[in-house]
């Protein structure tokens, strides 16, 4: 009797062990539930669709104020000082050109001319011919604005020669058109209300 009970117990144990060690599929261990159905609009939503639902707003033209220009000047000046201090001259050259552009917005031609001359000196040393040409064209515009026609022609001619030497066909065509316009424009009048900084003007006299 005991022997029969022992045999029955061993049989049940082996069956249970076999089921325990049987390799199960991931789905059996972690059952997967059906995915939730997405809303109908979810797949079709786009940025354009969002914009279409927004009310139209008339664009207001941006107007530069003196405060905006002075704030930009402070930022660029700080970058220029940093780049000059750490001898990143190529970037400093562009900083000077950016400063000149800001001064042109305020008709501060003397300061603009001074910074362009500094930028040009660096761009020549760095062999950045494209930047040199750009500076020369800006210098010519300033000199035309203040009535220095002969000096403006010299800058244009220098830019023309450099573009021709380097094979900058697009720049060359643009410069030749500008020279043509200057040559045949007999009524070049200086702009009124030119603002000069005394310290900068004193430096310009030595250029």
Image (cartoon, rainbow, N blue to C red):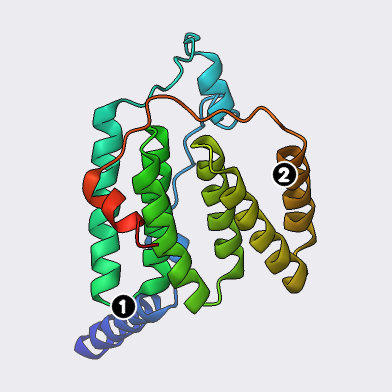
Label 1: which secondary element: loop
Q: Nearer the viewer, mark 2 or mark 1?
A: 2
Q: At 52% from the left edge and 44% from the top edge, which residue is drawn?
A: 143
Q: Which residue matches tag 2?
A: 178
Q: Residue 109 falls in which quadrant of the image?
A: top left
Residue drawn at x 47%, y 10% is 57
Residue 171 horizontal side relative to residue 34, left or right: right
Q: Residue furthest left?
A: 2
Q: Position of residue 2 (x, y in %)?
A: 19, 87
Pointer 2: residues within 10 angstroms few (<14), some, or many (20+)? some
User: In this rendering, does residue 25 appear at all?
Assistant: no
Q: Is residue 22 above or below residue 194?
A: below
Quarter occupied by the N terminus: bottom left
Q: Can you identify the residue that label 1 sits on? A: 87
Up-down relation of residue 125 to residue 181 (above or below): below
60 horizontally vs 9: left or right: right
Residue nearest the observer in this picture, 197 or 11: 197
């Amino acid at each position: 009797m005991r022997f029969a009970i022992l045999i029955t117990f061993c049989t049940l144990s082996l069956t249970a062990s076999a089921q325990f060690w049987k390799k199960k599929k991931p789905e059996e261990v972690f059952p997967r539930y059906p995915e939730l159905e997405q809303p109908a609009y979810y797949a079709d939503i786009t940025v354009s669709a969002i914009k279409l639902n927004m009310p139209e707003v008339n664009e207001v033209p941006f107007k530069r104020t003196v405060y905006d220009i002075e704030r930009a000047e402070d930022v660029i000046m700080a970058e220029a000082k940093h780049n000059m201090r750490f001898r990143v001259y190529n970037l400093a050259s562009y900083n000077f050109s950016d400063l000149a552009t800001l001064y042109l917005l305020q008709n501060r031609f003397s300061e603009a001319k001074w910074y362009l001359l500094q930028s040009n000196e660096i761009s020549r040393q760095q062999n950045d011919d494209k930047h040199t040409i750009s500076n020369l064209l800006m210098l010519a515009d300033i000199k035309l604005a203040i009535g220095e026609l002969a000096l403006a022609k010299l800058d244009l001619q220098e830019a023309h020669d450099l573009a021709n030497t380097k094979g900058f066909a697009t720049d060359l065509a643009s410069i030749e058109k500008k020279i043509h316009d200057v040559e045949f424009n007999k009524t070049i009048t200086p702009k009124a209300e030119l603002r000069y900084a005394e310290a900068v003007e004193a430096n310009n006299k030595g250029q």
